[in-house]
Image: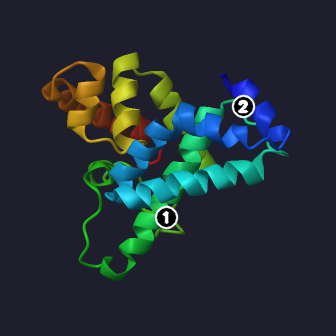
Amino acid sequence: MDDAAIIALYQRRDEQAIRETEAAYGALCNQIAYHITESREDAEECVSEGLLRLWNAIPPACPENLGGYFVTAVRNIALNRRAEAHAGRRGGGQTPLSYEELSPYIAAKDGTEQAVDRNALTDALRRFLAGLSADARAFFISRYWLALPVSEIAKQCGCSEGRVKMSLLRTRKKLRTSLEKEGFL
């Protein structure tokens, strides 16, 4: 079933919409949530909560891309759950490797006076991603948006881990240069 048909089910308040959404995007969202929370149970709960959010949001919302809308909701739920789980260990805890790799290139949330307008940074990142090759963009988004491990990205893309690692390294360097040119760093 395509996204438009599933959205129509949501708008009619037909519970089949939940089953169709889970069939279409549940496995992907479960995988993303698992890589963030590192817990199968938490990942399943994130997907369930994401489905509930969809049910409550549609209508009035009518997303153009149901998959993207759902993946983003589940990802945000998983990130919040991870933050809550590690709140007590913040000082000595370790950030996930994928976020640690990007930290030198993106300003921390803490510097309120020096923080760049979030929308301007978002636009700069979109322009940067649009200028990448399809492979580099897929590797970058899989690693830093979906938080997939390098081994999983390589497996899904049918290439070596070395190729993925090298592409990510080069892309991070290009990102730094791009953000420096635009005055973000």
Q: Residue at x 51, y 40 (%)?
A: 26
Q: Is residue 4 above or below residue 35?
A: above
Residue 80 is marked as 1
Q: In this view, does 77 lie above or below 122?
A: below
Q: Which residue is drawn at 67% across and 22% down?
A: 2
Q: Where is residue 151 in the image (x, y as percent from the top left)?
A: 20, 35
Instruction: Give the left or right position of residue 113, taking residue 170 as reference.
Output: right
Tag 2: Cα neighbours inside 10 Å, few (<14), some, or many (≥20)? many
Residue identified by numbered label 2:
6
Q: Residue at x 69, y 48 (%)?
A: 54
- Quadrant in the picture for residue 113: bottom right
* Earlier residue among tags 1 and 2: 2
Q: Where is residue 7 in the image (x, y as percent from the top left)?
A: 75, 33
Q: Which amino acid, mark 1? A: Asn
Q: Which of 143 and 82 is in front in this view?
A: 82
Q: Position of residue 145 (x, y in %)?
A: 43, 42
Q: Which residue is drawn at 78% across and 40% down?
A: 10
Q: Distance between the residues labelled 1 and 2?
A: 27 Å
Q: Nearer the viewer, mark 1 or mark 2?
A: 2
Q: Is residue 137 above or below residue 175?
A: above
Q: Which amino acid, mark 2? A: Ile
Q: Nearer the viewer, residue 117 or 93?
A: 93
